Amino acid sequence: MIELQDIINQFGGEYRESHNLSPVQIKAFSAIQNCRTAIMGAHVDTCDECGFEKISYNSCRNRHCPKCQTLTKEQWVEKQNHYLLNTGYFHVVFTLPEDLNTIILRNQEMAYRLFFKAVSETLLELCADHKYLGAKPGITAVLHTWGQNLMYHPHIHCIVTGGGLTKDGAWRTSRKKFFIPVKVLSRKFRGKFLSFLKQAELSFSSALYQDEWVAYCKPPFMNASKVIEYLGRYTHRVAISNNRIFALKDGKVTFSWRDYRDNDKKKTMTVTALEFIRRFMLHVLPSGFRKIRHFGILAARDKSNRIALCKKLTHTLFPSMARPTTILEKLRDMLGADFDLCPCCGIGHLSRASPGYEIA
């Protein structure tokens, strides 16, 4: 199977000679290139039955690496289970127009922060209006910067509770269909984001005030388990997974993509390896930037007490206070009970020789 790492290993040197990379891009580039190789060091797993030793190279753990997100995602999703409520949930998406791409790329950290601010304020202010809900909902927002063809396409996915906490401490349930008209949502968002850009002294075309911006609501989730399924798919996704890369031949990369403008048809696209790397590097986020954020009743301040109240009001069963799943248990759930079975004797199981025993 062709992987992103293979493409970077073969064409990364040529790409870096012709492109100026930021420090955070260089870090991601090198991490992906070296992931699970001798450069990252290694650790030894030993069979508890026959003593067989297996050397495994360490992962880079960079959040842009397609090899290193699965376990992180599972741990994050397990934590979010505690905050689910017995209510409906909506999936709302906010997209920025292409005319802003250049401005955003040149001012990523500021622009992404303002993007989150405009999205959260739009939802919270409209939900506070009694015409729509008259309460404060819970919002989990996830920033993605790519389209299926790997081109730059910044948008924020939001999971919004189908109800919220009123000022007097009661729970108010929303209508079954999304309770805010899409045009109201998009126009308020447009006004807020452009106002924030103006305050930040970032110039843009006045024609953007007249354009209709894209904000839409997908069909609501049927139950809480579907919310978790969604979160698992979207939160720790990178721009492209290795299983979408089909071929690397004659300096060109072929990968699969879905054309949403053509009835969501699955297609293949072939571009030069250098163009493929260029597109991927567009989606490396600023250092330390949080691409997953919570607002409303899910905001960090006094979150535990607020969620406990909401669980009572929505008749949500409190989960048992079981200990968190260990990494080993998670790996068994993901890979099967015998994922660590010794390849030599077929009886014992491999485990790390000792907590600090690694090969430099």
Image (tube, rainbow, N blue to C red):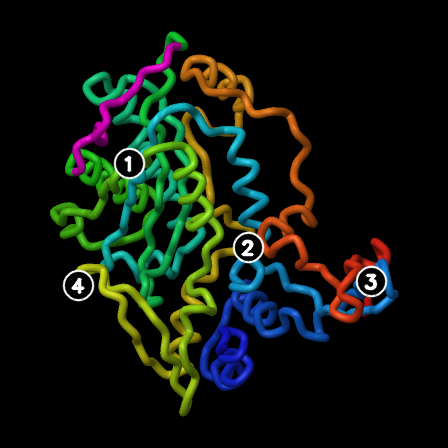
**Label 1: which residue?**
220
Dominant secondary structure of the residues highlighted in magenta in the image? loop
- Whether residues under marks 1 and 4 lie with C-beta atoms below 8 angstroms apart, the answer is no
- Residue 108 coordinates in the image, percent (x, y): 41, 55
Please report contact status of discs 1 and 2: CB closer than 8 Å, yes or no. no
Mark 1 vs 4, N-terminal side? 1
Residue 225 image offset from top left, x and y in percent: 43, 36
Going by the numbered disc 2, the residue's amino acid type is: Thr
Cα separation between marks 3 and 2: 25 Å
| C-alpha span from label 2 to label 4 | 30 Å
Please name whichever residue, 21 or 298, is drawn nearer the observer in this view of the structure: 298
Q: Residue furthest bottom?
A: 250
Asked which secondary structure carries label 4, the reply is helix
**Residue at position x 66%, y 59% from top?**
339
Outermost residue on the top side: it is 168
Q: Which residue is mark 2?
A: 70
Give the image location of residue 77, x and y in percent. 52, 41
Q: Element under label 2?
A: helix
Q: Nearer the viewer, residue 183 or 308?
A: 308
Q: CA distance from mark 1 to mark 2?
A: 26 Å
Q: Amino acid at mark 3?
A: Cys
Q: Would you name the residue on which mark 4 appears?
A: 262
- Give above or below for 243 relative to 156: below
Query: As shown in the figure, which amino acid type bears the numbered disc 4?
Result: Asp
Asked if labels 3 and 4 touch by Cβ distance under 8 angstroms, the answer is: no
Q: Residues within 10 Å of mark 2 (few under 14, many from 20)?
A: some
